[in-house]
Amino acid sequence: MVDSDFTLFSNFTYLLADPVNGDEFEQEDERVLFGGHIEQSFQLSDLNALMWGADFRHDDIKQLGLYNSDSQVRLGTVRTDKVEQTSYGAFGRLDWQASEKLRVMFGLRADYFDFDVDAGEPLNSGSDSDTQFSPKLTLAYLFTERLEGYANFGRGMHSNDVRGASITVDPVTGDPADQVPLLVPTEGGELGLRFETGTTFNATLAFFLLEVDSELVFVGDGGATEPNDGSERRGVELSAFYQPTEWLSLDASYTYTDAKFKDVDSRFDHIPGAIESTFSAGANMSWASGFGASVRLRYLGEAPLIEDNSVKSDNSLLVNAALQYDRGPLGLKLEVFNLTDSNDADISYFYESRLPGEPAEGIEDVHYHPLEPRTVRLAMSWRF
């Protein structure tokens, strides 16, 4: 069980909407949530295995509030709600060794969501439910002792904010508002090759496709996300692991993704914030003396910040490192975040904002959150 009381103050557009008090707003989230998960596996025969399970989660949200504020003092209420939402899931998977070289895995998951919104604006109150079945299929074929090919196909989903599924009136303007679906289906597939030599080296090359019925896009002036058009992502991923000695292991991964909106003008089909290229690599060292060390690198390439791709984010590079020592029950760890003290952007957006002295209509520009500065943390643990 988790009992949380969360408050966040933000100002994305500075003085655009309110040139006197500013555009600061407060978000309030007070909730209790609990849930459970069970699963069990059975070996039906030498060629077949079965796994099944179930899970659930309930959120009792006592207060969801959005308020206009100035210097963390509330000036007015935009929206307040109380929400009850519950999700139930059941899943199963059958593994079948169809032949000496072919493995088949079939899975099915069923999800049920229900909610009840008690809104401060009664017209936005409501309750509803939705169900989705998500089948999955995996085929794996062993070409040689070291090389295996595989294909995955499946259906999934993401859920939207339940307040968007019950809304009828915009809380700011009072205009009619369109509701969004509670569950949004996704469908995807993957074709890949795995190469492995014992426990010292393995590599995977995979081509993937993912289709989403509705993309969630960040809206700067509201500081939130809203549903948009459906999307399609195509890409390739290459990953490798190598352990040249007992004390040293190396790993690396590269991904390229072409992400576009579907069924829109091709001049405006780029998804804001969808990074095209990512790369990560790391080295881990562990000695019999109890000492260990690690270093990890993360590279994020450019991303379109507007649908016509006329504005892009810059790439960013982050390096983290750690030293550790374990002796009996005692553990010591020294971590350094952002080792190079890079001031690259961690995430970027493009929207209108206004600073003092700028035009009343605001100026469109890139807004970004920089990487956290170099940070050192020392931790000690005792196991008993």
Image (tube, rainbow, N blue to C red):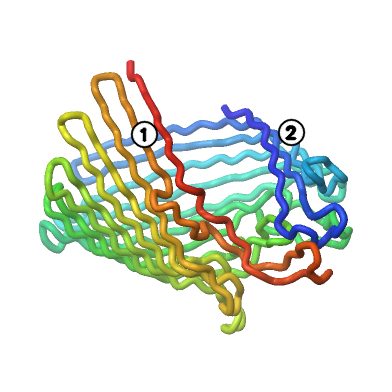
Q: In the rendered image, is residue 263 in sight?
A: no
Of pointers 2 and 1, the one earlier in the residue sequence: 1
Amino acid at pointer 2: Lys
Residue 355: give x, y in percent of width and height.
76, 63
Indicate the quadrant where residue 354 lies. bottom right
Judging depth in this view, the residue of 247 and 169 nearest the camera is 247
Where the N terminus falls, by quadrant? top right
Q: Position of residue 141 (x, y in %)?
A: 21, 61
Cα–Cα span, label 2 and label 1: 35 Å
- Kindly report which numbered mark, 2 or 1, lies closer to the viewer in this rendering: 2
Which residue position is annotated with label 2?
62
**Crowding at mark 1 (Cα within 10 Å: few <14, some 14-19, many 20+):** few
The amino acid type found where label 1 is placed reads Gln
The residue tagged 1 is: 40
* Above or below 70: residue 297: below
Q: Residues within 10 Å of mark 2 (few under 14, many from 20)?
A: some
The secondary element bearing badge 1 is classed as strand
Residue located at (76% from left, 38% from top): 82
